Image (cartoon, rainbow, N blue to C red):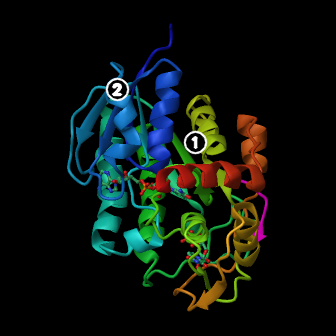
Amino acid sequence: MPNKQTILVAGGGGFLGSHLCERLLADGHDVICLDNFFTGSKENIRHLLSNPGFELIRHDITWPLYVEVDAIYNLACPASPVHYQHDPIQTTKTSVMGAINLLGIAKRLNIPIFQASTSEVYGNPTVHPQIEEYWGNVNPIGTRSCYDEGKRCAETLFFDYHRQLGVSIKVARIFNTYGPRMQANDGRVVSNFIVQALKDDDITIYGDGSQTRSFCYVDDLVEGFVKMMNTPEEVTGPINLGNPGEFTILELAEKILEITGSESKIIHRELPADDPTRRRPNITKAENTLGWSPEIDLNEGLKRTIAYFSSIFS
Ligand code: NAD
Ligand code: UDP
């Protein structure tokens, strides 16, 4: 393979990272997976350990490291509100110091670096659907701020390394993504509802369930990552990656109940602080720049994800 590369995937032991490692190996690359296993799991990548193209480094990206690679994907950061609020100082350190450490490698080696940013940079948006030009509406001192502001500062660092030092950057703003290998106890809505439905436990809707989200299936998202990394140097992003289908949380619960045939009852719990009321990506930029749009709709993606959770509980 002429363009075989060695690619560093920081956060490669997590939900999205493990799918990305698989994809890059399937494309013929060598992969160095770096993870401190805070929210990731060796189970996610155990099937890759025997692959000669795959290496694992247990490391925390808030500390410097030296590797020789051809490209970097930075996915290292807990993504679920429950986990990123568990140790909020470490969450900000991971986004900010982690970005500095990985950008330093990209600068030294003159290689491209991809940042897994987030729709959370838009906060509780006053512009809907969210376009990349929108600057966001983020509380700087709330319980979600460690994640939202950490990711915003990481974007600032990426663009300053680009402007000041000429580093080739690819910043993707990811909207809610789901699929196999989400952790059952992750606290995110899709995994929570599926696990509750499969166990016939109560489905916990926070608030009245009228808040909206847009859910992208993991395979679609990983395709977007790879397409973005393969763009010419002048494409920096930020580019929204997500599925523009918009559903209320109540609609999501009802779909999962229908597909699983569960006897679970819907109950309501208090809405967490600063929970965004609506979220939906405008993906025009991804369509025009990357030729990318998601192909797997929510029903199909939920069926595949439910099949995965059924298999781990059987
Ligand atoms: P995840 O929690 O499953 O994966 C994150 C991985 O990073 C885990 O393996 C974790 O152990 C590792 N990690 C955390 N802190 C680290 C550190 N200091 N050093 C090294 N490794 C560390 O979450 P995910 O859903 O796979 O998300 C991956 C990335 O995508 C994250 O950066 C997240 O912010 C971003 N993102 C995800 C979504 C989504 O819906 N899944 C949405 C927006 C953005
Ligand atoms: N949510 C819910 N019940 C749950 C978990 C989450 O109603 O058991 C809601 C949550 O309040 C939010 C939405 O589902 O409005 C998405 O939550 P998630 O934690 O998955 O991600 P977020 O988009 O908020 O980062």
Amino acid type for the residue under numbered disc 2: Phe
Q: Quadrant of residue 289?
A: top right
- Relative to 201, 266 lies left or right: right
Numbered badge on residue 236? 1
Residue extending furthest top? 2
In the picture shown, does residue 99 fall above or below 190? above
Image coordinates for residue 278, horizontal then vertical, percent: 71, 75
Toward the bottom, the furthest residue is 270
Where is 145 relative to 188, above or below?
below
Instruction: Find the magenta span and give its range.
Output: 243-247
Q: Residue 141 in the image: state x and y as whole percent.
A: 42, 84
Q: Residues within 10 Å of mark 1 (few under 14, many from 20)?
A: many
* Residue closer to the observer: 252 or 262: 262
Residue 34, above or below 82:
above
**Where's residue 108, x and y in %?**
30, 32
Whether residue 244 is in magenta: the answer is: yes
| Residue 54: image tag | 2
Query: Residue 55 colored magenta?
Result: no
Q: Is residue 299 visible?
A: yes
- The image's mark for residue 303 is none
Query: The residue tagged with tag 2: helix, strand or loop?
Result: strand
The answer to whether residue 239 is visible is no
**Residue type beneath disc 1:** Thr
Q: Quadrant of residue 147?
A: bottom left
Quadrant holding ligand 1? Answer: bottom left
Q: Position of residue 287 (x, y in %)?
A: 77, 42
Classify mark 1: helix, strand or loop.
loop
Give the label, 2 or 1, closer to the camera. Answer: 2
